[in-house]
Amino acid sequence: MNDSWHQNVKSKNRKEIISAGRELFLKNNFLNVNVKDICILACVSRVTFYKHFKSMDELIFEVQMGILNNMTDFIIARDNIENNGLERIKKILYSWIDFAKQFKDEMKFIILFDLYYEDYDTDKELKNKYENFINEENNRDFLYLAINKGIEDKSLRPNLDPIKTGYYIFQTIIAVLQRMIYTKLSKKYGVVSFDDIVFSVVDMIINSIKNTNINRNINNN
């Protein structure tokens, strides 16, 4: 048997372990899953598992990076670079909402990951790998690009700081989406829905960054 065959088997085993981990983590959350559970679903031995992952933590990080990458791809695929900056921001925010609706379990995983590993004493090598991944994701910063374009085409306020504004938008929309995913609205609010809340937040974000001087100038002319 040649090296190519062995490499294909190795790659197949790794993918099956990641797939099994993702399925179980999303269904039961990773705190309730162990290596034995992964091996049974992936049809691999513990020896094979540890050939690919030093620990369960490493597999959890791998799944987290995959989910974040999928979320970024989902949003970028729906962005239209031909639109002005303001319209691009709107589309990005609406795409985030769509992702949260379609992939609720993935959003819950992201929340649990952030909460659990924020204070967890993670392996330094694993932490560095994750930080490098986040830095690479930042290089695909669709918010930064859309904000810059909006400043240039004057659809957004000229005094915006693209980096700070992007961070503010990200933290705001993610926090609202995560809360909506994990909590139920009180019945005392009657007909108030998930959409009512999250779209009102989008409106607040848009109103805080759009260039209102353009409309004033048009009206004055």
Image: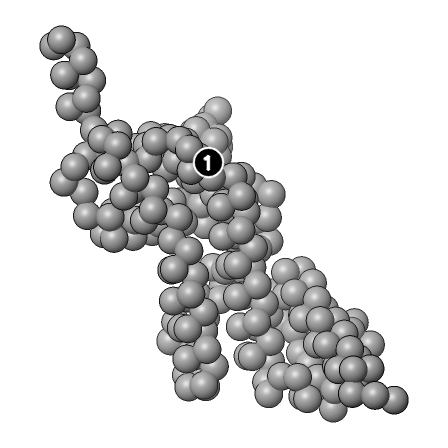
Q: Is residue 191 left or right of residue 176?
A: right
The residue that label 1 is drawn on is: 80
Residue 135: quadrant of the picture: bottom left
Q: Position of residue 4 (x, y in %)?
A: 78, 82
Residue sitting at x 45%, y 45%: 177
Where is 68 relative to 75, above or below?
Answer: below
Residue sitting at x 34%, y 46%: 145
Residue 132 visible: yes
Q: Secondary structure at mark 1?
A: loop
Q: Which of the image's four quarters has the N terminus?
A: bottom right
Is 140 or 117 nearer to us in this picture?
A: 140
Q: Is residue 153 left or right of residue 65?
A: left
Q: Position of residue 24 (x, y in %)?
A: 69, 66
Residue sitting at x 15%, y 23%: 213
Where is 207 relative to 78, above or below?
Answer: above
Q: Which of the image's four quarters has the C terminus?
A: top left
Q: Position of residue 138 (x, y in %)?
A: 38, 60
Q: Amino acid at mark 1?
A: Asn
